[in-house]
Amino acid sequence: MRILLIEDETLLAEQVAEGLRDRGMAVDLAADGLDGLHKAGTNRYDVVVLDRDLPLVHGDQVCTALAAGGADARILMLTAAGEAADRVAGLLLGADDYLPKPFVFDELVLRIRALARRANNAPRVLQRLDLAFDTARRVVTRGGRIIPLTTKEMSVLEILMAADGAVVSAEDLLERAWDEHADPFTATVRVTLARLRRKLGDPPLIETVVGAGYRL
C-alpha cells in the first residue's frame, strides 16, 4: 500500500516513515499542508496520515479538502490534540480515524492496514487457488505451506491478488508498491516479480501479459 504522511516534525516523520517502510509500505512525506495537498492531488494513496497543526495550510483544511474532493484515500489524523472533543471535531471534518500522540507504533500500523482494506474493499484474507495471503498477519501460504517473502514482494503480491485476475501494469505496481523516489526506468518491478515467481513455486501463478502487465 502507498501512504502519504503529512507531518511537520521532521524527526518524527522520518522515524514513522522508516518504520512503515520496514512493514512493507511505500511512504511519501510532506512537511506542510500545501505540499500535502499537492501530493494527494498528484499521486494515488491508500491512506493519508495527517497531523492537524501544520504550517501553510492547517491540517483541518487539508482534511476538509481531501474529504470534499472525493479522494479514495482514507484519512488518519495523528495529532497531539487528543481530547474527546478534538477527536469528534476531527471525525466531523472527514477523517476516517483519529490517533492521538503519543501513540504505540504497532497500533498505528494496524489502523493504517485496516483503513487501507476499507479503501480498497479488500477482505482480510486474499485467496487465489491454493494461495492465501492473510493481510493482517502478513502471512502468505500455498497449499498450507508458509512462503517467506520480503516486504516488497508481499506488497506486489497483495496488489496482484486484490486485482482478482485483472491485469496490473508495471507502472501501476511501481506507483503503488514504491514511493515517489522510485526510478521508473529501472528493472525493479521485473526483478521483484522474478523473485516472487520463484518463491511461489510451480505451477506458476503470475502471468506476464505482453504489452500490458501482469496478472495472477
Image (tube, helix red, strand yellow):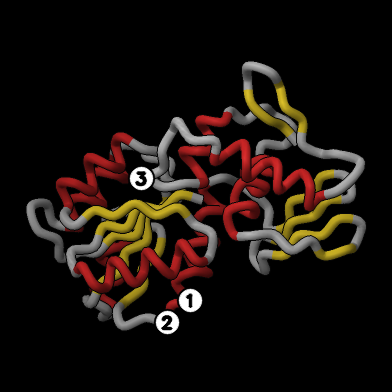
Position of 110 with respect to 160 (left or right) is: left
The residue to which callout 1 is attached is: 107
Identify whether 96 is placed above or below 137: above
Which secondary structure lies at badge 1? helix
Residue furthest out toward the top: 211
Which secondary structure lies at badge 2? loop
Identify whether 18 is placed above or below 168: below
State how far apart marks 3 and 1 are (Cα): 27 Å
Residue closest to the eye, 146 or 190? 190
Crowd rating for badge 1 (residues with CA inside 10 Å; few <14, some 14–19, many 20+): few
The residue to which callout 2 is attached is: 104
State how far apart marks 1 and 2 are (Cα): 5 Å
Residue found 90% across the figure and 44% down from its top: 202
Q: Are marks 1 and 2 in contact (CB under 8 Å)?
A: yes
The residue to which callout 3 is attached is: 181
- Looking at marks 3 and 1 on the same chain, the residue that comes earlier in the sequence is marked by 1
Give the image location of residue 140, x and y in percent.
Answer: 76, 60
The amino acid on which the numbered mark 2 sits, given as a three-letter code, is Val
Identify whether 191 is placed above or below 170: below
Residue closest to the eye, 179 or 73? 179
Q: Could one spot residue 47 in this view of the protein?
A: no
- Number of the label disc, if any, that sits on residue 49: none
